[in-house]
Image (spheres, rainbow, N blue to C red):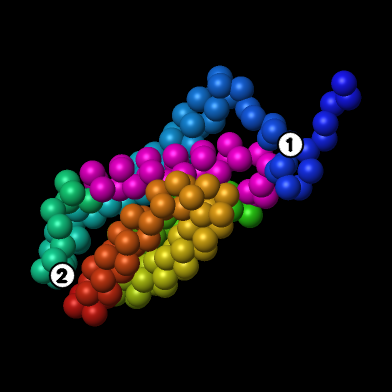
């Protein structure tokens, strides 16, 4: 009996699924990359916490510092899992989606460097510049959700808390820029 070739009605042929070992390694890689960005971004935050930021006028709705750390660790993990889910989908175009993810990580790293790191040099101008970086980050995060969703609905949903937190962060950044 000859082998049958799937028709469009039957769906595509089985995707090229990475081995279990490769999938685990990729997940660990995505988590390591995300948490490395988180760690590098926290360096100027830790330096400013005992310095200028401790004396800055902050929004009344600013959560305690430990909450920021906890939320970002969870968000970076969710983003890593989302990227991994997209990476696993071999049959669908995912390059642009993962490129947006990489850009989002770069902007996530740039924001604390700008907000916390440049303030001692640029003053309030650094806070406005950081708000511009945050606006670009929010746009990139939304575009990432829109690219991830069709590839993996779960990946798109995993990215949504990040978008919400970025909007919240923008409110804190705006308050700081106006008040300091």
Query: Which residues lie in the magenta part?
Result: 69-95
Sequence-wise, the earlier of marks 2 and 1 is 1
Q: Measuring 23% from the left and 72% from the top, which residue is drawn there?
A: 176
Residue 141, how many percent across, how many down?
46, 60
Outermost residue to the front: 1
Q: Is residue 30 above or below residue 56?
A: above
Frontmost residue, 98 versus 60: 98
Q: Is residue 154 above or below residue 130?
A: above
Frontmost residue, 46 versus 71: 71
Outermost residue to the bottom: 178
Frontmost residue, 120 versus 71: 71
Secondary structure at numbered mark 2: loop
Foreground tag (2 vs 1): 1
Determine which of the numbered discs, if any, sits on residue 41 in the image. none
Look at the image and tell me whether residue 88 can be seen.
Answer: yes
Residue 69, how many percent across, how many down?
24, 46
Q: Is residue 75 magenta?
A: yes
Q: Measuring 55% from the left and 44% from the top, which residue is drawn there?
A: 86
Q: Measuring 46% from the left and 53% from the top, which residue is drawn there?
A: 156
Q: Is residue 28 above or below residue 60?
A: above
Q: Measuring 23% from the left and 51% from the top, which residue is drawn there?
A: 68
The image quadrant where one finds the N terminus is: top right
Secondary structure at numbered mark 1: loop
Q: Is residue 62 above or below residue 2?
A: below
Residue under label 1: 13
Determine which of the numbered discs, if any, sits on residue 59 in the image. 2
Residue 25, how many percent across, how many down?
53, 25
Residue 136, how many percent across, how many down?
47, 68
The image quadrant where one finds the C terminus is: bottom left
């Amino acid at each position: 009996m000859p082998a049958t070739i799937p028709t469009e009605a039957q769906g595509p042929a089985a995707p090229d699924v990475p081995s279990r070992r490769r999938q685990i390694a990729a997940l660990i890689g995505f988590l390591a990359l995300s948490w490395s960005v988180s760690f590098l971004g926290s360096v100027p935050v830790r330096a400013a916490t005992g310095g200028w930021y401790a004396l800055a006028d902050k929004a009344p709705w600013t959560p305690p510092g430990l909450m920021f750390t906890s939320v970002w660790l969870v968000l970076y993990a969710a983003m890593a899992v989302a990227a991994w889910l997209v990476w696993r989908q071999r049959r669908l175009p995912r390059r642009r989606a993962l490129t947006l993810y990489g850009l989002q990580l770069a902007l996530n790293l740039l924001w604390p460097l700008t907000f916390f790191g440049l303030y001692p040099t640029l003053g309030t101008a650094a806070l406005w510049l950081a708000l511009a970086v945050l606006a670009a980050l929010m746009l990139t995060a939304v575009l990432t959700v829109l690219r991830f969703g069709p590839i993996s609905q779960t990946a798109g949903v995993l990215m949504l808390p990040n978008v919400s937190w970025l909007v919240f962060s923008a409110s804190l950044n705006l308050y700081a820029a106006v008040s300091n």
